[in-house]
Image (spheres, grey):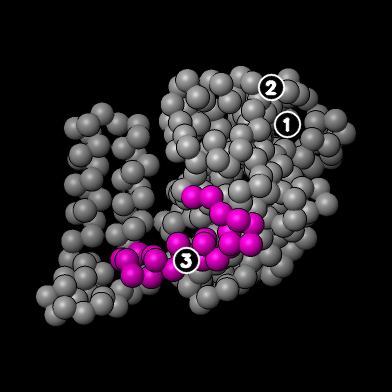
Amino acid sequence: MLVADSGKFETGGALTLTWPEADIALVTMTRDREMNTLSLELIQELDAALTASVKGSARALIITGKERAFCAGAHLRYFTQEDPRIGSGPFALRDKYLQPIATLFDRIETLPIPVIAAINGFALGGGCEMSLACDFRLMADHTKIGVPEVRIGALAGAGGVQKLHRLVGRGKALEWILLGSHVTAADALLHGLLTSVHAATDLLPAAMALAAKFRLLGPRAVAQSKMAVRLCGDSDLTAARNIGLENLAMLIDSPEWKEGMAAFMEKREPRFPPL
């Protein structure tokens, strides 16, 4: 849980937040016996960990899982056994369980720091959707990813359908979604869904190496660039260009801008202030 106003994160039952290096945050989902399904506890703790990562001046955040799964999607017991925190019926499930998941994934996508999914095991259903909300996806070579909800009479409702369409194209998205495919790491990489594929033992070091690269970059420039890329996907070319100009204007004459310019002129590495 997050301690109010401090940004300090105390370990809960669903995940841990650690700092393997001073400016890199690592979230590890730890409900491995339940394959890190999206319980209410995991939703709440992950939201708190996002807050703590930003308050702790992380330059990048890595999200990974434990044992067999990155995240195996929805906690299906909520659909088959009534939970008093949710209630029953389609609208209660939508408002008290499904909408909070979608809101959480939207927050991951809009976080001002880069978010890296280190997909150690199965990323299915909501777990795939969680990874799609991240900026980078690194995957272990032995595992699989996908939105197989049609196999149980459902569909990916937290952005998976839309994001797969944009990332891999209409044809491949239709194939994977309508067939409920469990996609191999090699196939996901081939079609542009992944940043890279690694042996299981190399996955976290590779994610750490990627995260460390953001130390050399202006954190506000990274945040504005991330925002520009996200907004441009919903805009025509002229509007997208104007978005880029506005994002650039937000940086001009900031302390980060001035340090970057000075470092360039003095031929030295910049020392950017935290976000």
Quadrant location of the C terminus?
A: bottom left
Instruction: Residue 265 in the image: state x and y as whole percent.
Output: 12, 75
Name the main secondary structure of what is drawn in magenta: helix
Horizontal and vertical percent for residue 180?
66, 25
Q: Residue at x 78, y 54 (%)?
A: 32
N-term-proximal mark, 3 vs 1: 1
Q: Of marks 2 and 3, which one's residue comes earlier in the chain?
A: 2
Part of the protein shown in magenta: 196-219
Q: Which residue is mark 2?
A: 150
Q: Amino acid at mark 2?
A: Val
Residue 247 in view of the camera: yes
User: Which quadrant of the structure image shows residue 89?
Assistant: top right
Q: Position of residue 149 (x, y in %)?
A: 69, 27
Residue on which the image places disc 1: 93
Q: Is residue 221 left or right of residue 95?
A: left
What amino acid does circle 3 point to?
Ala
The Cα atoms of the two marked residues, 2 and 3, are separated by 37 Å
Quick one: 66 or 154, which is closer to the camera? 66
